Amino acid sequence: MWYLAKMIRGMTIEQAIAQLEFNDKKGAAIIKEVLLEAQEMAVKSHNVEYKSNLYVAESFSGKGQYLKRIRIHGRGMFGIMDKVYCHYFVKLVEGVPPTEKPRTGFDQAKEYVQQLRNRTIIHSL
Amino acid sequence: LCSQPPYIVTGPLNIVLSVIFMCTVVPALSVQGPGIFPQPHRNEETEEHSFLDNMFWMAAPKKRRTIEVNRCRRRNPHKLIEIKTNIEPCPECGNLKQKHVLCGFCYEKVRRETAIIRGQIQAQEGKPLNNPAVETVVLYEGEKPAATDAGKRIVERKRQRPSWFTQY
């Protein structure tokens, strides 16, 4: 579920729905339903004009309450099997998704040098 | 040791085979006397003591993998899901489809119609494996069998011919 949530972060909603439609994971169908419902809600009650003008700003999954069951092994041993549940949260924002500028090696070097330059002695004159 | 299903036994599981107590099975003999001789029993015990010292026993992790190390492994790009670049809209219906796969919506539409036709064929035949040794022709409303459809079996459908079912 986390992998799916990570995949659609930052995508436009149409792109996200397309990717989830052709993914074979069980969570893909669930997340697609959630996205469609969120899109409908946005248009109906959140004053969004165009339903495709949305992008996925935040998307993450959290652990839900697990049910515990016994899984029987050989020789009288047993294991505790977890019936896994999770929550999924998504936030859609209207507009074009923000493009992240790719950080080059030169940019990283510049940042490092700037960090070195910012070093100072605290509480000094 | 096996408990009934309604009761959940909580306790740490030791899958790594530590000392397992198995009751020694005493074979039943018709002759009075000890069931098993004491010597093989002693050999078993000495072997159990030495297996713990044997260095080739079982591989086990030395240290707990920290969550940082676990995250590096789980979130490595090769484990993330790749986004597909072969999705495009179907020219017929407009739904999305993969380039090398038939459109799901169009396939479902054709499947429904053919399911109805097959139901009618089944009704015509009556029992299984009763198909005649001739070709089948599906005719819709207002259509008559052409000259080329002389000896063929005719299946009638009470609706207009769908645009995708061409008549050639």
Image (cartoon, rainbow, N blue to C red):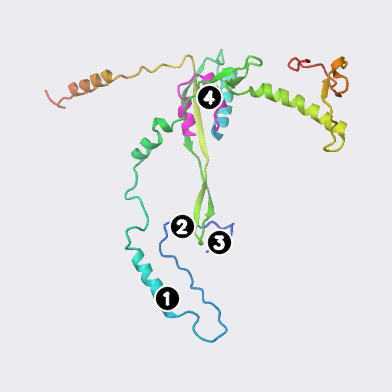
User: Where, by quadrant of the figure, is residue B31 drawn?
Assistant: bottom right
Alpha carbon distance from label 2 to label 3: 13 Å
- Say which of marks 1 and 4 sits in front: 1
Question: In the image, is B135 to the left or to the right of A5?
Answer: right
The residue identified by callout 2 is B11
Task: Residue B3: give its label.
Answer: 3
Q: Residue at x 80, y 29 (%)?
A: B118
Question: Gap between marks 2 and 1, in whole Å?
Answer: 34 Å
Residue B146 seen in render: no
Q: Amino acid at mark 1?
A: Pro
Residue A110: x and y, percent? 23, 19
Residue type highlighted by circle 4: Gln
Q: Which residue is mark 4?
A: A19
**Can you identify the residue that label 1 sits on?**
B40
- Extreme left residue here? A125
Question: Mark 4: few, some, or many residues within 10 Å (few <14, many ≥20)?
Answer: many
Which circle's residue, 3 or 1, is located before the other in the chain? 3
Query: What residue is shown at x 50% (from left), y 57% (from top)?
Result: A78
Q: What chain is tagged by disc 3?
A: B
Q: Position of residue B97 (x, y in %)?
A: 59, 21
Residue range highlighted in magenta: A1-24
Q: Residue at x 52, y 23 (%)?
A: A16
* Image spot of residue A28 (x, y percent): 55, 30
**Left or right of A13, for residue B137:** right
Mark 3, other Cα within 10 Å: few <14 / some 14–19 / many ≥20: few
Q: Nearer the viewer, mark 4 or mark 2?
A: 4
